[in-house]
Each structure stands twice: as C-alpha cells, then as structure tokens.
Image: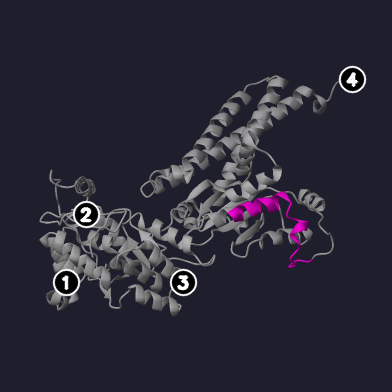
Amino acid sequence: MAVSEAQDPSAESAMRQSRMLESARKHTELVDVCVREVEALIARLQPRLSPLLSTGLPTYVRTLQREHVLLRDLATELASPNIADEALKLQDRRLEASVNVTSRGVAQWERLKRSRRFVAVNQAFQGSSRDDRRSEVAKLDVAGREKQKMHRILKEQGRVEVDVVEGGREWIAVKTVQRDRLARQLTDCGWAWGEHEMGDRVDEDEWDDVPLAKFVKRLIAAARMNRHEYRFPKIRLILSSLSRADDEIDIFINQLAHIDPLVEVLLEYQEGSFMSTPPPPLDAALDNLVGDELEDLTPTLNLDHTILIDLISDLTHSSLEPQAWQAPSTSSQIEEENRHEGGLMARTLYPVLAGRRIVCTSEAAEHFHHVLKNVGTETERERGRLLVPWGDETRSMSTKDIRDRFQQLSIHHLPDDVQVPVETVPEPWDMPAISQAVSRGVLPRVALDVAEASAFKSSKLSIFIYGWAAGVATVTSNKEVRRQVRAWVKINARSEDDIGPLIWTLQVTRNLLAKNASPRPGWHVKGRESDDDDDDDE
C-alpha cells in the first residue's frame, strides 16, 4: 500500500525545513530593523554622551549583529534542497537558540521605545551588600577558599540587570513567569490557599522563598544602594507572560509591590498599560529617548563662581590664539573655542540660562569681583561689573544700557531671553543664617551637618545652601562639587528621605585670561576655583 504524503517522512522534513527557513528570514529582517533603529539612537546620543560604552548600547548592538549573521547564514543553508535529517536537527537547535536571543533583544528595544530619557541598557547593579553576604557566609561554617568562593557566588547571585530610563529615576526589569509554576512555588512555601483577599498583607513566611519574590527583593536592595538625585529609583517590573486573573496569584503579586514603602515597585502584567500601549513612531520614540537634558532645571537658576567666570571670560567672548605664556588649560580652552564655529562656551551656556530667572548670592557676588580685581583682564572686569552690577556706575545703569554694553564686549550674540544682569540675593547665607533656616524648617537638619563637614569658605557655602533652601537648581562647571555634596548628604543623613540640593553641572568651563594678572604667592593664575578645592582666598 502506498504511503500517503502526510505520512511521508521526506515530505514532513521538507515542510519542517520550509518553516525553519521562513523563521530564519523573518527574524533576520526583525534584527535588521532593530539594529538600524538602535544605531539611529546611538547617532542621536553621540554628541551628548561620550563615551557611549557606559550606556550598554554598543554591546547590545554587537549581540544583535552577531545573531543577524547567524540567522542570515542559517537562511542560506536552509535554502538548499535535500538537507539530511541529522543536519536539519542541528540547524533547528541553532535556529531556536538564535531566535530566543533575537526575540528578547527586539522585545527589549520595543519596551525602550515606550520610555523616555534613556540612560543605559542591561545596566548591572549589586542587590546584596557586603555585610549581608558576610552574614550569609558565616551561617555556612566554611573557611579559606570555600569561604571566598561562597562570597563570589553570593555576589553573582545578588546581581541584577535593568534598563535605566527617565534620566535615572526609573529602572525597567523583566521576568518571565508562568501562573502554574508560581502556584506550585507558593504551595511549597506554605501559602494558605483560600484564606487571603486582595489588599491583605500576607505574612512573608508564606511567600518570601518564591524566586520571583527573591528577585524583587534584590531589585529593591540594589535601588536602595544606588540613589538618583538623593532618591531611590522607581522599579517597573514587567511580568511578560503573566495576565491578571484576580486570583490568589495576584494577591501574591500585590505583596511584592509593598515590600519596601520607600521604593516604588510598579508591577506590569503583559496586558498592562505600559505593554499594551504601542510605541510611538520611530522619530518620536528617539526624541523621547534622547530627552531634554535641561528638563531637570528649575525656573530660577542659582549660579556659582565658576559659571559667573564662564560668562565673562575673554576666552568665551573674544577671538584668541593660544600663547606660549598661558597655562596649558587656558591654551586648550582657546583651541576648543576655535574648533567650534561660533565658539563653544556661549553656545553651550546660553541655552541653559534662556528663559529663566538668574540669581547669585551676595557672598558669591563679592567673591566674584574680588577674584576679577586680582586676576581678571580689564575687559573681564568690565563684563563682570555689567553681569553682576558692582559699584555706583553700573548699579545706576539701565538694564538696556547694561545689555548693550555687554554685547559690545562680545563677538557672540546675547540672546534676548538670557537675563543680564544677574540678580543678587540680598540676604546672607552664613552659618548663623543656616542654623536659623534649619530651626524654621526651611532646611533639613542634615544641611547644618553638611555645612560643617564641607568646610567650604563663606562664598562657596552660601551658594549651595541658598540653592538648597530656595529649592532652585545651582548651576556649576565644577565637576567635583556635586559628588562631594551628595557624599556629605549621604554620610550625614538623619532619615532615608533626606534630600540634598539640586546641583546641575555644565560640562564645559573657561578660565580667566589673566593676561594682566599680578597674582599673589600661592595664587592659581587661572583665577578660579579648581575642581578639587576652594583655593581662592576670601
């Protein structure tokens, strides 16, 4: 009797090969589109973020490109006729592995396209502290190499990977879990089926050994150890294969959202609002991912010494050539200005200030003019008197006359929406004022501790304390000061929700030209505070 076509092994093999070929071609195209879109994001981020390695995007793209090559080669092989069964089985395993990697990578990009202000993809964080690991190892009664090995194992187990978005305020994590598996794990943990309702706080003993719960706890621990702007990042955990069913599994899931009252955990089912909302068109998605780096700035900006210097330096406003007598940093800044058509400092700083009220403290103003008197050139001193009115002559000038004269002293256009002159805050911000502000609740108690720990001189102290008390962003081109202040706030914090001042760092800076300077012994000729200390005399 003739064997029917449906039973013919060669026909089944041919159909299987055809399906595999279709899958290889389909996923090759998916990866190709995904790589092009991610490369478009990289091109948009390149001028702002250098190096891009910290974003994880180069590694992410290389992984996708490697799979693209594998899928393309598989498609070529599968297009050949009469492939032997053993060879076809091997190709099937290779295809399945590549499709899994590809599908995860493409899905990850689709999630990112729904997000804003991209920071990093697959960013690793440690979800266990050293003390916690030592405590766990101590329970095992091991020593020597076994002890070291257990430390490494626990450290690796505590590691979590997330995508960081919203400028650092949000982490996206994904977990693939099945409802029936969660039910079995809950049973193993001693979950009291039928005894709980949605909204109940269930004893952790009934669910804390479930792997998903352990994963969420690691995420929360990592968030606690990696604050963003003094706050714990929000965690968006996407349960990619789980649907809401209003059953006891959902009661368990609800427990995970309330593990730590200070770390917000958003649990997203596969049909949740985040996943069910289609990504915007590519151009809009890229705009959202790149975001606006000025979004965190407040309507009023508090300027420190470094920005005031940037705004009046001859290097910013004149066409210069490096000279042999100049400090290397000054020469390199002049060369940097010359490499950018229209200069760099003004084009970088003016958009930051545009449309905002600009202030400085009276202590900062006094110190600024003290520095210019000792180190500035004549034109820098005049710009300084115009920018921060000083002396009867400029204080009696109209705003229009001040702006007109400031424009005459610059080769760059002064935008109409950039406030010149700067407004000086009249009240002092010295230690007695700080103590009073703390007692009135204007500043948290930690502010006094930070003021004492920093040992900042009066002008520098007034700048950051005023910004803190007023709730306005302090703008600086000192790359170290933000790190220092954050460290002092962390060390001296009285509670988990103590929040320090918002400090926004400009990545470009300018020295004073100091052409006619007569520096005193020990004075830094560059005429400004260094990034490392407050070396200007008061």
Question: How far apart are the two marked residues, 2 and 3, measured between alpha carbons?
Answer: 36 Å
**Circle 1 sits on which residue?**
402
Among the two numbered marks 4 and 3 on one chain, the one whose residue lies closer to the N terminus:
4
Give the x, y percent position of residue 284.
46, 55
Q: Is residue 383 above or below residue 183?
A: below
SS of the residue at dot 2? loop
SS of the residue at dot 4? loop
Give the x, y percent position of residue 257.
66, 61
Q: Hey, what amino acid is under mark 4? A: Met
Is residue 210 located in the magenta-colored stretch of the structure? yes
Position of the C terminus by quadrant: bottom left
Position of the N terminus by quadrant: top right
Left or right: where 106 falls relative to 356: right
Disc sitting over residue 1 in the figure: 4
Q: Nearer the viewer, mark 2 or mark 4?
A: 2
**Circle 2 sits on which residue?**
511
Question: How far apart are the two marked residues, 3 and 1, measured between alpha carbons?
Answer: 41 Å
Q: Nearer the viewer, mark 4 or mark 3?
A: 3
Q: Is residue 229 above or below residue 447?
A: above
Q: Can residue 127 be spotted in the picture?
A: no
Give the x, y percent position of residue 112.
53, 51
Res. 88 image quadrant: top right
> Hey, which residue is sitting farthest right in the picture?
1
Disc sitting over residue 445 in the figure: 3
Say how many tags the image has: 4
Q: Nearer the viewer, mark 2 or mark 3?
A: 3
Question: How far apart are the two marked residues, 4 and 3, measured between alpha carbons?
Answer: 93 Å
Question: How far apart are the two marked residues, 2 and 1, measured between alpha carbons?
Answer: 23 Å
Among the two numbered marks 1 and 4 on one chain, the one whose residue lies closer to the N terminus:
4
Provide the residue span drawn in magenta: 197-221
SS of the residue at dot 1? helix
